[in-house]
Image (cartoon, coloured by chain):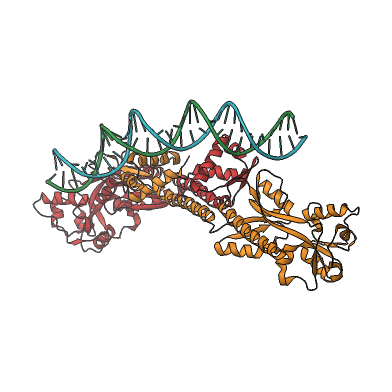
Chain colours: A red, B orange, C cyan, D green
DNA sequence: TTCGATCTATAGGAGATTCCTGTGGGCAGC
DNA sequence: GCTGCCCACAGGAATCTCCTATAGATCGAA
């Protein structure tokens, strides 16, 4: 089978006009070049050089071969460069899994960080739900992600980075005076996000479990997909809702006016962790994993400091 | 060093999604593919497939590599086709050496023959003079040619194909009544072609030798480069000339009006031969050699028949 | 949960390939 | 004719490639 090495030898011979010169240029012994070219001639079933006296004269076939041989070598060289540029994070796509509400915690800042360090890359932050993202991790479609615990998979490396607390949110200050108990939740008019994921979402399940113990089911009055929509509805006074302190923290000034919050008792927590498969991470994922870990831990410290 | 085989294995793996399937498709055992891809990863210093469970997931680097790997393989395939098409005389250049006046014997017809049989090829008929063409043959710049004898080179295969006779040409019928002798030549007003090649041209040297024996030098009154120019001058009655019967035969109706010819005594002959280096000829040269041999031999028979 | 099918990784060995050194022969220039 | 240079060839060492066999891991179905 035609080999690149043969083409290299052929081109060097063509360029330098002799096997000996080509051998010198390529750092081989002359018979090696001679043999490679002979093999090439044999495989192409044609003569590439007329052996005339002590010299070589390229044939028409050699002239026909040259541009394609060069093209093949150039393509291979280009292949090496392309891979290197992905390896060095100069180009390519950085893909990372995130939980649904990650945008309140880090999304824009994270992307800014990555782009600043690696201006040539594409960034994909994918994930509608922690469970779905974990599935992507298991199937290998994602290399790393930041999602809500629990992650019960011994093949995954799990690094907790932030513990967040669920709080009650309402536009009515009267309903925020006391600590909110599960039975308060059971009787409240609630708007909850994640309509499509209510079966698998960890927050929903925690909430449902707590309310269930009071003997009542968790039956939100309104269900929407998006956390911000739920907050907007709460701001209008149409219903109350629950959300994570981190979300409120992340929204900052953008939190709809008039909303206040109160802690739940017993408190409900959610822990987010950076998760990836065992084994070596690609440089791209390494970068994002480190950035996310730093940012989330910073956020964790900031929120704990506020509580204290 | 990166090899085509590795790229082939990589592409097959990418396409079929597993080493095993790629091995089946390429007709190898699975470990061979596995190893080739591993080598490729090692040489590119990157991971191309994440080994996840019992499957493989291509990495970003693999996606970056794919188009270049395909391009390299395509270039090699194209190289094979290009060479084959030259080998099969579908494209490429057919180069053949000819003596200066070959156009009177065969040039246009020969080209027509070649082009009819091989419509895609380029044709080059090169040669200003038999001695020059022979030098090209020796240096390997030409593979085969038809030139005037003698060819004193034991590495050449020489096939005589046509014997031609030198004749005296004049516009004055009075000077054509008798056989022309060397002393007639010595005293005649002559126009001779091949001004630039008078030192090496075999005709000139034969002629000079014959005249020299009469005690006089050969001093043509006029020298021009081209045979047809010499004949035009002779037709105007400005001088007489000599030329080969084959030239007159080849010119046919295009011979300038008013010219007649007479044989020389003793007769002077020139033999043309198809000449090429020992060893195998390229298919292209083989074709031309055969055509030229046929045509010239046919011409030889035609001219001998006329004489008889 | 277990079993069987399926896939990758690894080991070891047979066979090719590749590359080397050494040598012979042809050619050109002095 | 001598010398230098180049290609071709031979033989052997090192490397590469590919195979079979097997172990380890995973997934899906029973």
> Residue sitting at 27 percent across and 57 percent down?
A227
Report the label total. 0
Q: Is residue A223 visible?
A: yes
Residue placed furthest toward the bottom: B257
> Residue sitting at 31 percent across and 51 percent down?
A102
Residue A143 at x, y percent in the picture:
33, 45
Query: Is D9 placed above or below A92 here?
Result: above
Residue placed furthest toward the left: A215
Q: Which image quarter: residue B95?
A: bottom right
Name the one closer to the observer, B278 or B48.
Answer: B278
Q: Is residue B118 visible?
A: no
Name the one closer to the observer, A8 or C22.
Answer: C22
In the image, taking residue A106 as reference, residue B140 lies left or right, namely right
Q: Which image quarter: residue B119?
A: bottom right
Residue B169 at x, y percent in the picture:
81, 66
Name the one closer to the observer, A51 or B159.
Answer: B159
Name the one closer to the observer, B81 or A181.
Answer: B81
In the image, taking residue A134 as reference, residue A65 lies left or right, namely right
Residue placed furthest toward the front: B308
Residue B46 at x, y percent in the picture:
42, 41
Quadrant where the C terminus of chain B is found in the figure: bottom right
Residue A165 at x, y percent in the picture:
24, 47
> Residue sitting at 55 percent across and 47 percent down?
A47
Q: Which image quarter: residue B227?
A: bottom right
In the image, taking residue D15 as reference, residue A256 lies left or right, namely left
């Amino acid at each position: 089978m035609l080999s690149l090495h043969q083409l290299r030898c052929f081109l060097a011979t063509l360029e330098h006009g002799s096997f000996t010169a080509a051998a010198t240029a390529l750092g081989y012994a002359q018979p090696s070049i001679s043999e490679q070219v002979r093999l090439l001639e044999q495989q192409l079933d044609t003569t590439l050089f007329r052996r005339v006296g002590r010299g070589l004269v390229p044939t028409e076939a050699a002239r026909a071969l040259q541009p394609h041989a060069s093209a093949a070598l150039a393509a291979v060289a280009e292949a090496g460069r392309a891979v290197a540029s992905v390896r060095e994070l100069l180009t390519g796509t950085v893909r990372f899994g995130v939980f649904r509400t990650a945008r309140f915690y880090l999304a824009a800042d994270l992307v800014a960080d990555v782009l600043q360090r690696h201006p040539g890359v594409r960034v994909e932050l994918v994930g509608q739900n922690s469970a779905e993202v974990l599935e992507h991790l298991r199937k290998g479609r994602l290399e790393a992600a930041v999602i809500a615990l629990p992650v019960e998979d011994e093949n995954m490396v799990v690094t907790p980075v932030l513990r967040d607390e669920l709080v009650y949110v309402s536009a009515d200050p009267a309903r925020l005076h006391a600590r909110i108990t599960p039975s308060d939740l059971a009787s409240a008019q609630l708007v909850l996000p994640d309509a499509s994921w209510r079966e698998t979402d960890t927050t929903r399940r925690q909430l449902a479990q707590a309310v269930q113990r009071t003997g009542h089911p968790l039956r939100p009055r309104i269900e929407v997909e998006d956390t911000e929509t739920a907050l907007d509805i709460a701001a209008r006074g149409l219903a109350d809702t629950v959300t994570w302190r981190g979300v409120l923290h992340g929204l900052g000034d953008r939190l709809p006016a008039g909303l206040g919050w109160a802690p739940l008792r017993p408190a409900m927590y959610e822990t987010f962790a950076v998760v990836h498969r065992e084994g070596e991470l690609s440089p791209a994922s390494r970068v994002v994993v480190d950035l996310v870990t730093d940012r989330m831990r910073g956020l964790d410290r900031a929120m704990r400091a506020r509580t204290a």
